[in-house]
Amino acid sequence: MLNNMNDTSKKSTALDAFLNLLTLITLGWFSISFGRLLFVIIDKTLGDTSRNDFFYSGNQFSFPIASLLIITPVFLLVSGILHRYYKESKLEKGAIYRWLTYFMLLVAALVIAGDMITLVNNLLDGEYKIDTILKILTVLVISLGIFLYYWYDMHRTDYSKRSGLAQTAFTTVIVVTLAAIGGGFMVADSPFVARQKKQDQQRVADISALDSNIAEYYRESSTLPSDLSEKRFARYVVDPGTEESYEYAKKEDKKYELCATFALPAPRDGRSDYPYLAYDYAYSGGPGEWQFHEAGRQCYTREIKEGPEKDIRPVPVKPIKQ
């Protein structure tokens, strides 16, 4: 009989650990995904949507929405099972529950403190942008909600009666999650536009890689390639949308032209440092001048320059036409 009691205790401890750990992990995943989705909604509706950075950040809505659609039901289901086991006395609030709950309270308390410091610091520095303040308040509300609920649950001893606060929390999670997902779908790009943006990002990466490889070719042979048929260019030469080759033309001994057709415009945001951005990015393998483009066919004339230490860099002959 003693062995049976020990086996039951071990099973209960293992089940308690499993359910509490799964609750903790899904809660963290839910909180991060929910906050991230609210962040991108704030960026899209109240932030500076003309910023080129937002264009090249990809579809920021897809992952948090997908996470919420999967993780939220799992979190609610596991929490419900755990509370039912407490109610039926199949599990007790043991050391595992207390340790994990205190850990959640500690993390939530630290996030709340850090968030309040950030909010006060921004206000003292004169940072009154509504999108920044809303993001800080979003983290604060999520963390405060987690802290208050688990503080209450830590001191709850009677699970035989239904808790009004627990039911309210359960309903609130469902309502705010559905509202956030609905808001995300309303302001997110359509799948077609998201696909176009992704293809344009690939075009920017391909053109940048071709530019770097052409410079490397010149460094090795002291001449420009006549075309892009060499193996080193094959990986980057095909347009992801049309599956046709990008256009390349050798103009002079050190001048050449690269052309691509973009689906959507990506403005320069009026940046006065554009020529320097183009020069530095092109040499480092970054986006270069083609990061900022109009919709349709765009051509970029490049020229090989040898620096003081004989380093070879392609630089733009002229900025993109606006």
Image: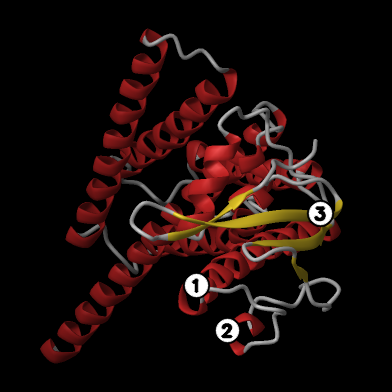
Q: Nearer the viewer, residue 167 or 186?
A: 186
Tag 1, which secondary structure?
helix
Q: What amino acid type should be assigned to the residue bearing mark 1?
A: Glu
Left or right: 148 as drawn, with respect to 34: left
Q: Quadrant of residue 2?
A: bottom left
Report the front residue among 61 and 224.
224
Q: Residue at x 43, y 57 (%)?
A: 83
Image point (51%, 31%), residue name: 138
In the image as oriented, which residue stretches furthest toward the left?
2
Depth check, mark 1 against mark 3: the one in front is: 1
In the rendering, at what x and y percent does residue 59 appear? Answer: 68, 54
Residue denoted by label 1: 216
The quarter of the picture where the N terminus appears is bottom left
The kind of residue tagged 3 is: Gln
Residue 249 is marked as none
Q: Which residue is mark 3?
A: 298
The answer to whether residue 170 shows anywhere in this view is no
Residue assigned mark 2: 232
